[in-house]
Amino acid sequence: MTGALLIAARELAERRTVLIAALVAGCLPFASPLFPGVRIDQAADARDAMALILAVSFSLGVALLLGATIVGRDLSEGRLGFDFSRPLGGGAIWAGRFLGALVTTLLVLAVVVLPTSLVGGGVFSSSLGDLVRPWSLALLGAVLVLLPLVHVVSIAFRSRSAWLGVDMVSAVVVLLVIGVAARRLFNAFAIGDLRLGLLVVGVVAILALWIASAVQVAGGRTDLRRGHRLQSIVLWSALIGTVVCFDGSTRWVVSADPGDLTSAFAVPAGRGDWAIVGGEARGRGDFAPAFLMDAGTGRFIRLGPALSMGNVHNALFSADGRRAVWLKVSGPRDLRTDTFFADLDRPEPRPREALITFSNPWIGVALSEDGRRLAALADGLLSVYELESGRILGSAKVAGPEKNGRPVLFFAGADRVRVVVFEHGIEIYEYQISSKRMEKTGEGSSVFARPSLSFDRRHDRILVRDLGGSRGSEMLDGRSGATLATFPTSEGGTKRQGHRFLNDGRIVFAERAGEATRLRVVSVEGQERSSIDLPVSGEEVWLGGEASPGKLIVAHGPRGPHVAGEASTILLVDVDTGEVREIARGLFPLMAFWRGTEVPAPGGAAARLFQSGDAVVYLDPIAGERSVLAGLPPSGSMQ
Amino acid sequence: MSGEVTPIGVRHLTVRYGSRAAVDDVSLAVPPGGVYALLGRNGAGKSSLVRCLLGQQKPSSGRASLLGLDAWKDRAKAMRRTGVVPEDPDAPPGMTAPRIALFCSKLYPSWDAAGVAERFRRFEIPRDVPFGRLSKGQKGLVSLALALGHFPEVLILDDPTLGLDVVARKALFEELVSDLADRGTTVLLTTHDLAGVEGIADRVGILRGGRLVVDEEMETLKQKHAATASALEEIFVAVTGEDAGGGR
């Protein structure tokens, strides 16, 4: 330690002229008011800014110079033998020389800033203060990197040995691996993971540079080539090992499977057992993977980051449940959106890329019932594509939807795409693919301030429910928009809590009046057929899917859905007989969040998937058996 | 110092640069108080051998030792008791001789500050001229003063008179002889100055192409070549088959 300090002091003394030059440079900012274009009221800022610029450039320049000469020049000029002929350890010689260089650099920085700081408060109290503080850390980091980096490069070039080739090849390999691994995380929207990974690689790189320089001095001594060889071995072993680990860790991050999910969500298909499952994965930081998963068998397909699909909002299933389609953006900075699909009726479904690309993900999409055609609505232009070939089957401008809310679109049969725009009034457009004709088929006005739309299975009828004050509902014709029926609440003070189109076209409303909660069943024609009182007192009610035709999943709990996921009770209600049976507790039906444009078939994943805390749970409503599909359920909830 | 310990020892030392052997299986030993002159033409391997002895270069094989310590592994320990005069004086160029001496004084517990100052005075070393601006002869004499400043048991001199003028060379050898007479320091010196070492060396080694072709007592060597050569230089030429070259 003493030896190192002695050498550091000697190095500092030898470079006192640099400090004198820094002091002279520190006085130059006082001439800045004389510069052309500097107003009198800007003099202080101009002086401070110049001091900052000089301090940064001067200290970085000194760091560069010292890094290149602190050992390298003495070594190549045969002067390092003086230290090695003394009773000084190699480590002390290295530490002393680098400590001397580091202190010299920092002193230069301080000395350049000092005169300006002593006058008029200086940079640390002026308007530039906020700029200085964060960047001073960056400058310190730059000095800590520059000194050993320039030293290492200097040694490599001074030695003129074949190891220079190894250095160059290794540097290229390291940069390539970092680039590939970083790009992998970036495209996976794992920006936090990327920052952490690069921070670790950066810290290891800085440590490796310092250690390599120490080994070069202490192990190579006055033998330049041996020192270079040792330096290269240490540096590249550490760096290549680190970047290989970084690359491996990024592969590991993006290779998460459903079993790794700790907090899961799911979007079930309308028919069959497939669902889009996504969420946070164990040890993966901010990478949130999404999967196409068969809830019945556990088979899955990796879809990539959930964020690339707008948190799976841009994923949908065909009504027959045989095809899944998802739209993915290329990356956080590249909004080009590509279309992928998978045929779920194959023994080993695989993701396939359709030749359909959009400029951004902010589009409305719909899939034909057989999944062969995709309709997309963006910027008022409706386009219909054939998924297999990517061929565009037709497109047409939809009048005016861009000035309204986000329109709803769906296939009405294989040849027609219907666009419903509903904000202050309703407008319905229909595009016939075969004739390539777009026509406005209906319009009307709504009395509701906050309407919510849902459709029957064939999209022949639209149920408009007011989320505002009236809580009323009305049924419209799906093509013309004509009012078919209105459904006022059954009595004063009744709060309508939800509704569901059944697969056969009937509608079930959930209502609460005081402490009583009931289901009202409405026929296809819009006439009330029955009312079923639920054994529920003063609680919220949510409607799930149909476990089998006419048998509806109903959840009730004390408060909102996030709490109710743990506290809710699941009932199976036979809407034909009025029988009510409790089948589970602690679950919340995912169907409660189902998009209103489709009606799922009875008995599929839509009726069997539930949220339980951070887990997605598969429940057989008839047998009452449950299993965790993904995520971590609350402890004890699976008993 | 234990009488059993060889102050300067080299055993089967080989130094390779790629496929070329600069030092090829050299063994030698200098007993306590001995003065060993290692001779050889430029590129014969003298400096490589000296660097190994000083622990500054790792030999490809074999071992060099100073005062019984492994020169590579225990370099710092060995240097506490060793003085070194390099071929090219290598002190920090921006420091004056007194400041260099001050720096060294903090590294050696037995530093003789007065003795070093006296030598500087005797050698007429300017007090306020940085080392880098001294003449080659002055630099060599400063190096010798520093090397002797801590009463070393071993002194290694790597061609210390190279490039020195007659006066500086004379001063250096006089100082060396004086120190040897006073304290019996063990010395290994490489040199081209054959006449200079003739009076002080008691053993001579000659390196040729990296191999130690002669390792004899000075007197024995002279007797062996008495018929053909009377001076060390003539013996050197006879052994190496060529002129010593470069050194004089």
Image (cartoon, rainbow, N blue to C red):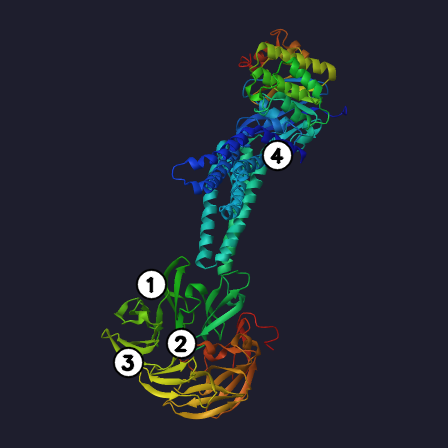
Q: Which residue is mark 3?
A: A442
Q: Are marks 4 and 3 in contact (CB under 8 Å)?
A: no
Q: Secondary structure at mark 2?
A: loop
Which of A480/A617 is in front? A480
Which of A52/A209 is in front? A52
Q: Are marks 1 and 3 in contact (CB under 8 Å)?
A: no
Spatial separation of the CA atoms under disc 2 and disc 1: 24 Å
Q: Nearer the viewer, mark 4 or mark 1?
A: 4
Q: Are marks 4 and 2 in contact (CB under 8 Å)?
A: no
Would you place residue A103 above or below residue B111 in this image? below
Q: Earlier in the sequence, mark 4 or mark 1?
A: 4
Q: Secondary structure at mark 1?
A: strand
Q: Say few, some or many: other residues with alpha carbon within 10 Å of mark 2 (under 14 / 14 to 19 / 20 or more).
A: many
Q: Are marks 2 and 1 on the same chain?
A: yes
Q: Is residue A265 visible?
A: yes
**A376 sits to left or right of A77:** left
Please, what is the three-letter code of the amino acid marked with disc 4? Gly
Q: Are marks 4 and 1 in contact (CB under 8 Å)?
A: no
Spatial separation of the CA atoms under disc 3 and disc 2: 30 Å
Q: Are marks 1 and 3 on the same chain?
A: yes
Spatial separation of the CA atoms under disc 4 and disc 2: 72 Å
Q: Are marks 3 and 2 in contact (CB under 8 Å)?
A: no
Q: Chain of mark 1?
A: A
Q: Are marks 4 and 2 on the same chain?
A: yes
Q: Please name the residue shown 39% across and 75% down the image.
A: A322
Q: Earlier in the sequence, mark 3 or mark 2?
A: 2
Q: Chain of mark 4?
A: A
Q: Which residue is mark 1?
A: A357
Q: Chain of mark 3?
A: A
Spatial separation of the CA atoms under disc 1 and disc 3: 31 Å
Q: Which residue is mark 4?
A: A96
Would you place residue A204 above or below residue B118 in this image? below
